[in-house]
């Protein structure tokens, strides 16, 4: 295995790891909001979160690339204020990856929360527990399988991203060239052996992740 092969896989893991961590921090409170709160724009918010499931990745990538441009308010603000240029950078594909992978984190967490009996929360409130304490000590322990599923699905989805990454980040070795793009490049150059190496690694990682998900979801426990 050459240095470029290893660095590409490490960059792929770095992108997936950071995306998963950021989305988990964002996803828990957002999933709680969607599971238990009612507000006027809730259907709109749920639709926006689920949009990446039906929207072609290149469409989202195009609009994010436009937003990153200095010709756009957002891109101009970042460049003038922080001297940041997100287009064709790791930070740029990270933000795009977070947006594109949002439903893969939110939906399992939301489903896990809604599956917990309402009586659990009511009992905790009756015992004088605050909403935050109930969330930490009652709800989270009872949705561990959903949390693991959300983390695993988000990570697995990230390592296979292509459309959004190529639109926002292009193909820059060591910066934005992840494994999915490397496979496409190697096939275009008829380097099928190298493409097979990348594909095999992604296949094994995805298989392991899915096996873990199904194994854990078959052993659900209730904590209170």
Image (spheres, rainbow, N blue to C red):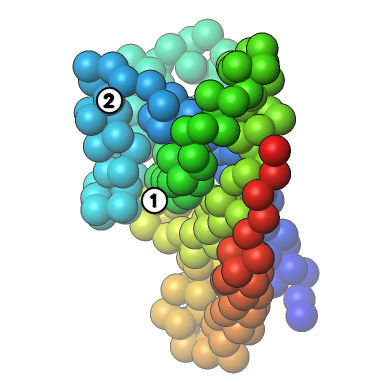
- The answer to the question of whether label 1 and label 2 lie on touching residues, with beta carbons closer than 8 A, is no
Q: Residue at the spot x=59%, y=25% of the render?
A: 123
Q: CA distance from mark 1 to mark 2?
A: 26 Å
User: Residue 45 at x, y = what percent?
Assistant: 29, 28
Who is closer to the viewer here, 209 or 189? 209
Give the image location of residue 67, x and y in percent.
34, 28
Residue at x 65% of width, y 49% of height: 222
SS state under label 1: helix
Question: Which quadrant of the structure image shows residue 24?
Answer: top right
Provide residue 1's location: percent of width, then percent of height.
Answer: 76, 80
Quick one: label 1 or label 2, which is nearer the N terminus?
2
Q: Which mark is on residue 56?
A: none
Which residue is at the far top?
Answer: 81
Query: Could you say which is closer to the camera, residue 137 or residue 195?
Result: 137
Question: Would residue 88 be seen by someone viewing this image from the given angle?
Answer: no
31 to 93, vertically: above or below: above
Looking at the image, is 80 positioned above or below residue 199? Answer: above
Looking at the image, residue 116 sits to the left or right of residue 6; the answer is: left
Q: Where does label 1 land, which residue?
A: 164
Quadrant housing the C terminus: top right
Label 1 or label 2, whichever lies nearer to me, is 2
Quadrant of the rendered image containing residue 3: bottom right
> Please, is residue 191 above or below residue 22 in the view?
below
Label 1: how many Cα within 10 Å (few below 14, some 14–19, many 20+):
many
Q: Which residue is mark 2?
A: 42
**Residue 61 seen in this snapshot:** yes
Query: Residue 177 placed where, x, y %?
Result: 56, 58
Q: Residue at x 66, y 33 (%)?
A: 138
């Amino acid at each position: 295995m050459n240095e470029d092969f290893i660095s590409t896989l490490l960059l792929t893991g770095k992108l997936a790891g950071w995306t998963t961590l950021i989305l988990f921090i964002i996803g828990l409170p957002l999933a709680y909001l969607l599971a238990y709160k009612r507000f006027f724009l809730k259907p709109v918010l749920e639709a926006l979160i689920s949009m990446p499931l039906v929207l072609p990745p290149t469409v989202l990538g195009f609009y994010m690339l436009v937003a990153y441009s200095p010709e756009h308010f957002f891109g101009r603000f970042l460049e003038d204020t922080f001297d940041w240029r997100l287009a064709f950078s790791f930070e740029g594909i990270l933000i795009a990856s977070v947006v594109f992978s949002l439903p893969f984190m939110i939906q399992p967490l939301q489903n896990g929360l809604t599956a917990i009996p309402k009586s659990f929360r009511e009992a905790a409130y009756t015992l004088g527990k605050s909403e935050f304490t109930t969330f930490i000590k009652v709800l989270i322990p009872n949705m561990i399988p959903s949390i693991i599923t959300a983390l695993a699905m988000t990570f697995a989805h990230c390592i296979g991203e292509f459309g959004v990454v190529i639109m926002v980040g292009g193909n820059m070795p060591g910066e934005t060239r992840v494994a999915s793009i490397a496979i496409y490049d190697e096939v275009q150059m008829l380097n099928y052996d190298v493409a097979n190496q990348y594909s095999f690694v992604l296949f094994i990682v995805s298989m392991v992740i899915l096996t873990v998900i199904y194994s854990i979801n078959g052993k659900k426990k209730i904590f209170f």
